[in-house]
Amino acid sequence: MKKRVILCSVLALLASISYTRAQGLLQCVQPLSGTAPSTTLAALKHSEAGSEKNANTIPAVGLPFGMTQFTPQTRLTENKCIPPYFYKDSLFTGFRGSHWLSGSCTQDYGSFTIMPVTGALQTTVNNYAQVFSHQQEVTTPAYYQLTLPAAHLVAAVTATARCGMMQFTLQQDDSLYILVTPNSDQAKGFIQVDAARGEVWGYNPVHRIYQGWGKPAGFNGWFFIKIDKAIAGSGTYAGDQRFAAVSIQEQKGMGAFVGFAMKKGEKLRLRIGTSFSSLEGARKNLQAEIPGWNFEQVVAQSKQQWEKALSRIQVETGHDKDKRIFYTALYHAYQHPRLFSDVDGTYPAFAGSGGLKKVAGQYYDDFSMWDIYRAQLPLLEVIQPAMINELVRSLVLKGQEGGWLPIFPCWNSYTAAMIGDHSTAVIAGAYAKGFRGYDVQAAYRLMRKNAFETANPTDYKNGMGRRALPSYLQYGYIPMEDSVPEAFHKKEQVSRTLEYAFDDYALSVVAKGLNKANDYTILEQRAANYRNVFDTSVGMVRGRYANGQWVTPFHPDKRESYITEGTPRQYTFYVPQDVPGLAKLMGGTDKLEVALDSLFAKDEYWHGNEPGHQIPFMYNYTAAPWKTQRAVRQILREEYNDGPGGLSGNDDAGQMSAWYIWAAMGLYPLNPVPGEYMLSSPLFDKVTIQLPGNKQLQIVCHKKDDQAIYIHKVILNGKSYTKNFLTYPLIRQGGKLEIWLQQEPAGWGAAAHHSNGR
């Protein structure tokens, strides 16, 4: 670690807007961050026991947004809330080709594991698991290496977008066996070995989660493995039983093995293709992405791709720790959505709706939508804009193939996980920022269907359509009498009301742009439904019955059944579409400021959960934007850290990390649809964002010391700038934003006027 710190220090001095001079950012990434329980202050207070205390990331090796991540494995299962790797574990059980949703509490799916075994052949985990220590690991996004002294072996893996390559180096003369296991907890799947051709292939069937839990998802995780040495012996196994048969299927603990007689220093290499479409797809992907046996070349190419991706944002600072946290966050923000199509565009139809499809370009899935619409996808709109049309096209294709726009599309299926209808928010955000590389009319029809129609009972139970929409339309809120039974998260009526109001606002933006006047009028009115669950007598949101009465007793700081993963006080501030309207309900912007002060004074701000991520930036709507600057700087300091426990809760497909990236740059998309980014004081001396057309946005801080965190002057492209937000067009045109900071709070930005996206 000390060597990496020194290297990062040197690199900080060499940082430049030139990509070629930005080489080495990869060294600042810590892939083990988030693999241990959180040690941050808010997590220790607010997180429930168990999965909420873990960021649940993995040391993923692969390219940004890749189909399959390769990771060291310390847990065998594909069960919910158990990632393949836990920092506290001490037994290595192989390299997994994983489809774990980074930073989530979901489940892995369609995965397989490759384990090297030296000496005598062993096929049960109790016998082949190898003790390891973190001092024996080398971890980067492009390459992972582990030395296993007891096995006299060095194991390494690298990867491309859809494929992986492994290399095993013997440290003494010995026998080497490779075990290949489809990781099915349901004893499903198939594997076959062809010793003459040096090939192993198979599949692990994917099963649904949440709606339709346990049912086949209609596709498999396919793998195709090529081996660079002649196989001395092979077979199959199920647990401790071994068979001469070349294939095996539908058995618990099944797999295939191949054996070799190895000399000291000799290397065995494996090339692995993966696909969600077919065996042939896995073969084609492998041939296209890793056609040869040069392991070092694949590593070099992967490093190059990561350096290019990381250098989309370049930061300059004298604090190496901040730089390490930043680029680790960017690494995590680059994990999802997941590439689902093969090199020829083939992908499995959404929700098992009809075999294989083909798309021009790429098809993506695993949108952790309740999380990433807030900051992670808006980040990609700025630094990876070429992806946005493909992401929206993927969502539209899902809606066309399944009949309904999915709420939370993961495992290439409907899920009805979490709450809200935020595929609408994502499409509306892209539309509002000028992205048009998709069928806009088809997208609108699908979004409108979700907002105005209810699926038939069978489809609704299958996860199609908004949960509890009839109640929402009837009352303008979801009353307590509707327990929302057909959802993974049941009840949570107030939180659902708030998030549907935001989604209605998002759709109204598109309706207005398409001249859908009647729809716009209705949706704009529905965007104000947050008022229907705001109790002015307590100044907060509150559960409400169909007759209009409020739930009693009222507990503002306890988790309530009508709130999603939080408290009424925390969720009161979720009105990103109309902060001035919320302030008016509270009694004015001064009352909004008091309410925000109270939240922080009571230590009730919980950074580990997404609905509060906009809260610190809401001071920009008051007479005290300096309080945003103070709160954000405190969160950056207290809720992110170096090391395995440095994230304050589930990273949720990069949302937690994306918040850090935005906030450290001094920006945040409080309302992610229209493209208005609240300004705060940047953490770094200089930030350079690479933009299309060879443009750049430079954010330069002028300050005497690190205690200067309050903005007192801003100049944009040589002219005084008094607004406390930037717009998407301003960012995209590039230029230079200079910010002067001082130690005392200042009045800058207090007179800013926000459109709030309207």
Image: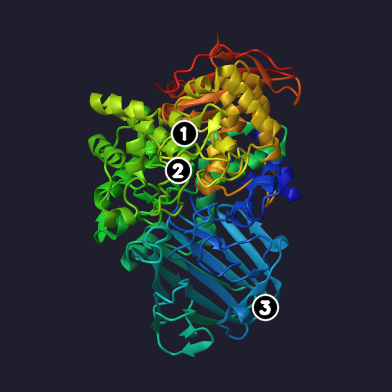
Q: Disc 3 vs disc 1: which is toward the camera?
A: 1
Q: Which residue is mark 1?
A: 533
> Separation of disc 3 and disc 1 at Cα?
70 Å
Front one among 307 and 244: 244
Q: Which residue is mark 2?
A: 493
Task: Check disc 1 and give the amino acid type.
Answer: Val
Quarter residue 503 falls in = top left
In the figure, is residue 740 to the left or right of 167? right
Quarter of the C terminus within the rendering: top left
Task: Check disc 2 and give the amino acid type.
Answer: Gln
Quarter residue 163 falls in = bottom left
Mark 3, other Cα within 10 Å: few <14 / some 14–19 / many ≥20: some
In this view, 44 is above or below 196 = above
Which comes sooner in the sequence, label 1 or label 2?
Answer: 2
- At which x and y percent is residue 45? 69, 46
- At which x and y percent is residue 210? 42, 58
> Separation of disc 1 and disc 2 at Cα?
9 Å
Secondary structure of the residue carrying tag 1 is helix
Residue 260, visible in the rendered structure = yes
